[in-house]
Amino acid sequence: MNGMACKNPAMVQASDFAFRGLHIPGNTSNALGSRVTPVAVTQIPGLNTLGISMVRIDYAPWGINSLHTHPRATEILTVIEGSLEVGFVTSNPENRHITKILKKGDVFIFPVGLIHYQRNIGYGNAVAIAALSSQNPGVITIANTIFGSKPDISTDLLAKAFQVDKSVVWQLQAKF
Amino acid sequence: MNGMACKNPAMVQASDFAFRGLHIPGNTSNALGSRVTPVAVTQIPGLNTLGISMVRIDYAPWGINSLHTHPRATEILTVIEGSLEVGFVTSNPENRHITKILKKGDVFIFPVGLIHYQRNIGYGNAVAIAALSSQNPGVITIANTIFGSKPDISTDLLAKAFQVDKSVVWQLQAKF
Amino acid sequence: MNGMACKNPAMVQASDFAFRGLHIPGNTSNALGSRVTPVAVTQIPGLNTLGISMVRIDYAPWGINSLHTHPRATEILTVIEGSLEVGFVTSNPENRHITKILKKGDVFIFPVGLIHYQRNIGYGNAVAIAALSSQNPGVITIANTIFGSKPDISTDLLAKAFQVDKSVVWQLQAKF
Amino acid sequence: MNGMACKNPAMVQASDFAFRGLHIPGNTSNALGSRVTPVAVTQIPGLNTLGISMVRIDYAPWGINSLHTHPRATEILTVIEGSLEVGFVTSNPENRHITKILKKGDVFIFPVGLIHYQRNIGYGNAVAIAALSSQNPGVITIANTIFGSKPDISTDLLAKAFQVDKSVVWQLQAKF
Amino acid sequence: MNGMACKNPAMVQASDFAFRGLHIPGNTSNALGSRVTPVAVTQIPGLNTLGISMVRIDYAPWGINSLHTHPRATEILTVIEGSLEVGFVTSNPENRHITKILKKGDVFIFPVGLIHYQRNIGYGNAVAIAALSSQNPGVITIANTIFGSKPDISTDLLAKAFQVDKSVVWQLQAKF
Amino acid sequence: MNGMACKNPAMVQASDFAFRGLHIPGNTSNALGSRVTPVAVTQIPGLNTLGISMVRIDYAPWGINSLHTHPRATEILTVIEGSLEVGFVTSNPENRHITKILKKGDVFIFPVGLIHYQRNIGYGNAVAIAALSSQNPGVITIANTIFGSKPDISTDLLAKAFQVDKSVVWQLQAKF
């Protein structure tokens, strides 16, 4: 990653390539009912330049990993526990919504840069392990980006973009 | 581009590298008041594998080029006529809104994969020329992707993602 | 992947991005006591050009995933069940052996092209999920490559390379 | 760019992504009758690693943007004002000269590394906007490189390369 | 290379990776007194996508490998026999001429896209082996490109580019 | 190379791009009867980021350049003197051994990441010049990596990997 130098190969240690605790459930007591635990270059310095990272995702019943994109990575996800509804939307002009119900042991791909989501469709917890094709994939959560940026995007512009009254935009901005 | 073969170099002609008509104003009589005219690999076959493309963007007074991302390209834009408010939002967790007023001759960058927009902030037309770092950059318009995909993303999921009543989601979906 | 064309984006279906059955234990009744179940471009056509794949690895008690390299990928692995001894060896001239004991929830990196292994160090089964930074990472198992290629590498050469009698080489070649 | 570190994303400002003044005509009072105004990583630090840049080119009547190559970039150019004769030459052994007359609104591609030029073929000024597929494309002007390097390339070698008398070479070297 | 598919790995043969005859001197009976014998993807199909190729260069006494660039490759050259004057010129605005006398066993680098040359500076033959960082590096010989393209670049433009009379340009064009 | 900054282009000198002595035979008085003389980024700083390097390989009669891989490079080799048996083994599951006898002037390719070797099959010395598609290709010699790493890989694991008694492993480890 630009700005991080690689260690001298004669000095690296096993701990530069390791991380502990991906078996620990993330805390899903939040509005969306989900939690992402990342293992990327920030957590494992030895990942620098190597082009891969991993995450654990926990979902409370009916919890969602909200609509988001990774600007620099494709994602491959497998369900460890529970059932998930997953989907992504293709780019303009088709905007096709590709969706599937995943059970334990199912694997699904979210191609680089596309907006995607997962939702727990069961009354128990769900868990997924996913990997991303970058040591620093980035995450852009649509709702936070559009309605919760600092400073706000102008209400006029958002009202026009989503073709709604400003009052609807204010309602949305108030949440993020 | 995968699926398009390159021509034999001994057979290429000037017309394989050319396009006509980027001086012609696009029709902005639509809900957003803007029009993008692309010059990419679909318009110029000779661009295949060369990693660049161009667009002209026309804006009616107060028209917007709505919130979108290019999954495979950075964009560099210059204002030919009028004044634009432009912005992009950085990825999680900061979600910083980087914004600027551009006048004729100003240049601005939208880094690869980030959500961005432009808005004409004048009572006359505005025109921009922009270039993208891919022959096939892709466009993901947020509103169309989220609220206008085919088939729809489930109302339950969207209501949770944006933390609003389903009635608000229905209102949004009705527009796209 | 050279030789595989991408599908028209308007035609892709969810099944092009999905795979079933990664929760099913692999059959470890073999000489090494391990089994790798791959989910790569051969299993999911939609992975083509996307730069990532996944595997499940099952280990019988004391089973090993023998010394091997991936010529085109870095690997990130997490332990789902059991305990593993893992390691890789750095390139010449240091040939440092970087090794670690992993328990459930631990994550480890095997950098691209380096020779590495895992061994179950418990009396129960072990399971790992790993991801690789290529849709077609390739696997070169050292023992099979050196002593089991078709046709054989010459005994003279192997005897010199490993500085042993030809009888030792014959013994090794007989196994693969 | 090697040797330039990226800024911390939490610290970037709109001014890191902006440039002023591309509407200002460049001074074409020089032997070639043209002027290139670049907007690359030197002018916009935020372009670092993003793989794109832009230029404005002004041409006096009959002025030329002399024969040159960009070792690291393809160029896409559109005519804003006037008419241009443009061309590039393909590599050995064909050395095909691909040429075209461009009017206002026409777009043309110069593929990476090929020698190319533009010439104003009118009695008024001409203006083009072009983009390049690198934040640091480099420019190699053939005449300056061959006949104006510091120190000079040997006259003997140039005489043989261009198959002319040394006196012709001296005449050429005297100009650059 | 776009347009060439890779063979099925189960079908490749040793002959797909081999070439014969690089020890045979090239015929240097030509105006420049040199000959390049290439071993690239055209000669060895198995090189496709592998990013490297090789050449043998023969030089008659005082022969030159004329000024040229490789648009897609860096070159590393070693002298097998004789002595060579070699050089390259850096890009604008410095146009520094980096030059060196090489004897048998010396190695020199010509960075990607820069104009470079070699000259035999002895009364006997010289031979070099060089490698290029592409299976299809391309060669652009400056003199042939500028003064020998098909069709010709306009005399007016060349006269202005090199700041000489048209008669000098005609003289140069007559040679190529 | 990460950790090495590039020099300012205005400061580079010919010596940054040059190396002396590739005509000097390497000392082959060792157990394998071969010697590799590298010319890579450590020897020529100007190679940084340029993606190529060169080696000279000397072979005593019947000497071998033992089984090894380059994790970041394809190799192209030509025989300058003598005759070589060369080969590489394809990846799983085929493990095909592609082999050929090379005479003076023959050229052969070893694709990136595959295990390969050369052996002098004559009673005189042999010499090869090879180039690699990286300025820092890396070398992993199988025997040293497997049986001579520091610290040792566990004897139990190696006995299982190669399906031999521990006594055979001890014999092998004693040599490296």
Image (spheres, coloured by chain):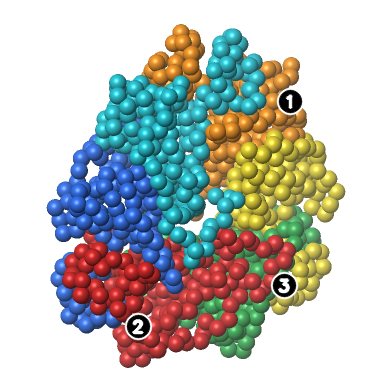
Chain colours: A yellow, B green, C orange, D red, E blue, F cyan
Write the residue at 15% across / 56% down: E30
Q: Amino acid at mark 1?
A: Ser
Whether F92 is drawn above or below B46: the answer is above
Q: Amino acid at mark 3?
A: Ile
> Label 2, on which residue?
D32
Q: Residues within 10 Å of mark 3 (few under 14, many from 20)?
A: many
In space, the residues marked 3 and 1 are separated at their CA atoms by 50 Å
Q: In the drawing, does residue F150 fall left or right of residue C151?
A: right
Q: Position of residue C8 (x, y in %)?
A: 46, 52
Q: Does any portion of residue C61 appear in the rendered image?
A: yes
Q: Residues within 10 Å of mark 1 (few under 14, many from 20)?
A: many
Chain of the residue under the numbered disc 2 shown in the image: D
Eye-nearest disc, 3 or 1: 1
> Label 3, on which residue?
A153
Asked if badge 2 and badge 1 are on a common chain, one would say: no
Q: In the drawing, does residue E27 fall left or right of residue B26?
A: left
Q: In the drawing, does residue B51 fall left or right of residue A60?
A: left
Image quadrant containing the N terminus of chain C: top left
Q: Are marks 2 and 1 in contact (CB under 8 Å)?
A: no
Dividing the picture into quadrants, the one containing residue F133 is top left
